[in-house]
């Protein structure tokens, strides 16, 4: 049987008003959080989570499972060896992040990787209904859908707070949460999931004025130039390639179509013995960057089709004085475009 939403509305405005009144205007829960320095502070957590989709997709599953389905098609560009290397890349980066960064669990590390482009078993939600509607109108379809689910839907389902780590900038902007698709949970549109998790799906038509209204909101949520964390995944993939060897041209192209491309930018905080303390900063602090050129540079660093060695860019690099904002040279090439 084809998927049927719980309710169809005549307009996005009607659906938005209903969602606000039914779910979003309730008072939030207060939970206590703790900063790295030990300061205890209150956090407001919503009772309900929201997910927006542009299109009448019959299923809603995680990006890793979608990749598995795509891999069975004849025209899929990645080889079995590429898929094994991609899986190892994701696993190793999650381990590295969870070991290096205080209070970042392996699950939260995976969620962080997903937010910047890599596939995982996590499906994104937000605590802000306006953001869900902004994503629901972000494609080309004339049909939008928004799902609503309790923040604590079931004792057997894990909901990850994607904002937990202090520099998960994109997730914090988006009020991000994630549902871990495990224990037989494969499709959030299935009858079993809808019943077990108390998910409700609402459908509405999308007009050009709807897209115009939400365009600025979505751009702010996704903009890499003012996101201090935007370049971290590209940086870590580059280091990974330096350590374990280059990737196939097909896997390189696939990654470059998925991963956020931005300079890895930071401010030098202090020098402590042989260690350098740095703070993430947005690429907007630089003179600018050309995304197309930066993509080509990463392609030459990652792909076995090119001889370029990214570590060559580090030969003449020296740490500037404390307080200086700088970008990792392997992720920023202003000499190629005059920035």
Image: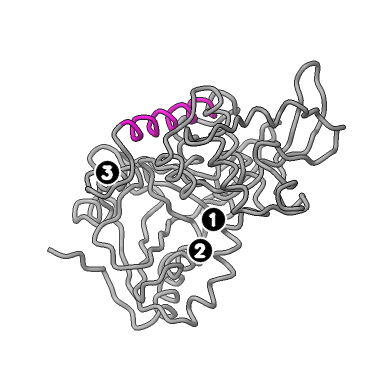
Q: Which mark is residue 174?
A: 1
Residue 176, above or below 17: above
Residue 230 x %, y %: 61, 46
What is the distance, in whole Å, between disc 3 and disc 2 at their CAs?
31 Å
Question: How many neighbours does mark 3 have within 10 angstroms: few (below 14), some (14-19), or many (20 or more)?
Answer: some
Q: Quadrant of residue 154 in the image? A: top left
What is the distance, in whole Å, between disc 1 and disc 2 at their CAs?
7 Å
Question: How many neighbours does mark 2 have within 10 angstroms: few (below 14), some (14-19), or many (20 or more)?
Answer: many
State the residue position of label 3: 71
Q: Are marks 1 and 2 in contact (CB under 8 Å)?
A: yes
- The outermost residue toward the right is 321
Along the polypeptide, which appears first: circle 1 or circle 3? 3
State the residue position of label 2: 131
Q: What residue do we see at 50% from left, 63% from top?
A: 131
Residue 332 x %, y %: 69, 43
Residue 272 as seen in the image, left or right of residue 213: right
Residue 138, magenta (yes or no): no
Along the polypeptide, which appears first: circle 3 or circle 2? 3
Quadrant of the drawing holding the N terminus: bottom left
Q: What residue do we see at 38% from left, 54% from top?
A: 150
Residue 193, above or below 56: above
Residue 126, above or below 333: below
Q: What residue do we see at 25% from left, 37% from top?
A: 183
Residue 199 x %, y %: 30, 58
The magenta segment is 81-97
């Amino acid at each position: 049987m084809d998927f049927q939403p719980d309710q169809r509305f005549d307009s996005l405005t009607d659906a938005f008003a209903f969602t606000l009144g039914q779910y979003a205007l309730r008072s939030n829960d207060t939970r206590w959080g703790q900063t790295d320095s030990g300061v205890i502070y209150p956090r407001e957590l919503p009772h309900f989570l929201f997910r927006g989709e542009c299109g009448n997709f019959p299923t809603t599953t995680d990006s890793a499972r979608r990749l598995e389905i795509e891999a069975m098609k004849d025209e899929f560009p990645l080889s079995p060896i590429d898929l094994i290397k991609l899986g190892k890349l994701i696993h190793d980066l999650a381990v590295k992040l969870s070991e290096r960064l205080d209070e970042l669990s392996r699950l939260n590390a995976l969620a962080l990787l997903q937010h910047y482009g890599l596939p995982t078993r996590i499906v994104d939600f937000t605590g802000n209904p306006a953001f869900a509607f902004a994503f629901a109108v972000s494609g080309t379809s004339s049909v939008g859908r928004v799902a609503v689910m309790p923040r604590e839907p079931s004792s057997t389902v894990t909901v990850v707070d994607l904002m937990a780590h202090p520099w998960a900038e994109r997730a914090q902007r988006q009020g991000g949460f994630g549902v871990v698709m495990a224990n037989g949970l494969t499709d959030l549109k299935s009858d079993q999931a809808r019943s077990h998790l108390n998910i409700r799906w609402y459908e509405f038509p999308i007009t050009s004025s709807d897209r115009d209204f939400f365009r600025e909101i979505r751009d702010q949520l996704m903009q890499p130039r003012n996101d201090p964390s935007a370049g971290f995944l590209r940086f870590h993939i580059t280091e990974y390639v330096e350590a374990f060897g280059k990737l196939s041209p097909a896997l390189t192209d696939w990654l470059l179509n998925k991963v956020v491309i931005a300079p890895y930018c930071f401010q030098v905080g202090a020098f402590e013995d042989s260690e350098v303390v740095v703070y993430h900063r947005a690429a907007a602090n630089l003179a600018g960057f050309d995304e197309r050129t930066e993509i080509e540079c990463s392609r030459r660093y990652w792909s076995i089709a090119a001889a370029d060695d990214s570590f060559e860019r580090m030969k003449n690099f020296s740490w500037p004085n404390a307080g200086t904002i700088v970008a990792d040279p392997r992720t920023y090439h202003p000499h190629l475009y005059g920035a």
